[in-house]
Image (tube, grey):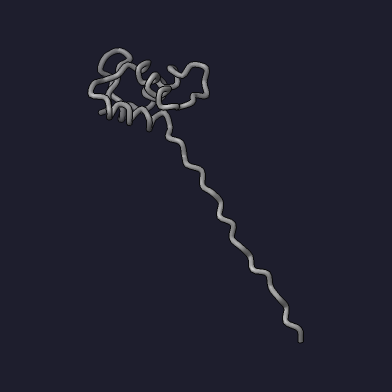
Amino acid sequence: MKKVKRKKKRKVMKKKKKKKPSIRELTIDILKRSKKPLHYRDITKRLKKRGYRFHRKDPERSVYIIINRYPKIFKKTKPATYKLR
């Protein structure tokens, strides 16, 4: 009888892509670092400085929508000005 050589299967390790933080996560971080409540336009400016790339034409609207979607996280202090709860 002849011995049959078997090929060893190699496991290919796939590189995991790093998950990019969301607008909500970055906004939380920005407000944590800020000592005072911020206007949503200021939050948008800081997101742009950090290099976040928006997919909409109006990034300020994206930030405003996210902030208003999570009232348990963000507290309104003045018109269009928010802080963390």
Image quadrant assignment for residue 24: top left
Instruction: State the image coordinates of residue 35 (x, y, percent, origin top left).
Output: 23, 24
Front-lying residue, 68 or 14: 14
Q: Residue at x 33, y 15 (%)?
A: 80
Q: On the image, which quarter does residue 26 sit in? A: top left
* Above-or-below relation of 74 to 2: above
- Image spot of residue 68 (x, y percent): 37, 22
- Outermost top residue: 79
Classify the position of the N terminus by image quarter.
bottom right
The residue lying furthest to the left in this view is 35
Q: Residue at x 37, y 22 (%)?
A: 46
Q: Quadrant of the C terminus?
A: top left
Q: Position of residue 25 (x, y in %)?
A: 38, 32
In this orientation, which residue lies closer to the viewer: 73 or 33? 33
Residue drawn at point x = 37 percent, y = 24 percent: 67
| Count of number-bearing discs | 0
Q: Is residue 57 left or right of residue 41?
A: right
- Does residue 10 appear to the left or right of 57 in the view shown? right
Residue at x 43%, y 22% (from the top left corner):
48
User: Outermost residue, right direction?
Assistant: 1
Vertical order, 71 against 7 (above or below): above
Q: Is residue 39 left or right of residue 50?
A: left
In x, y percent, where is residue 33? 27, 28
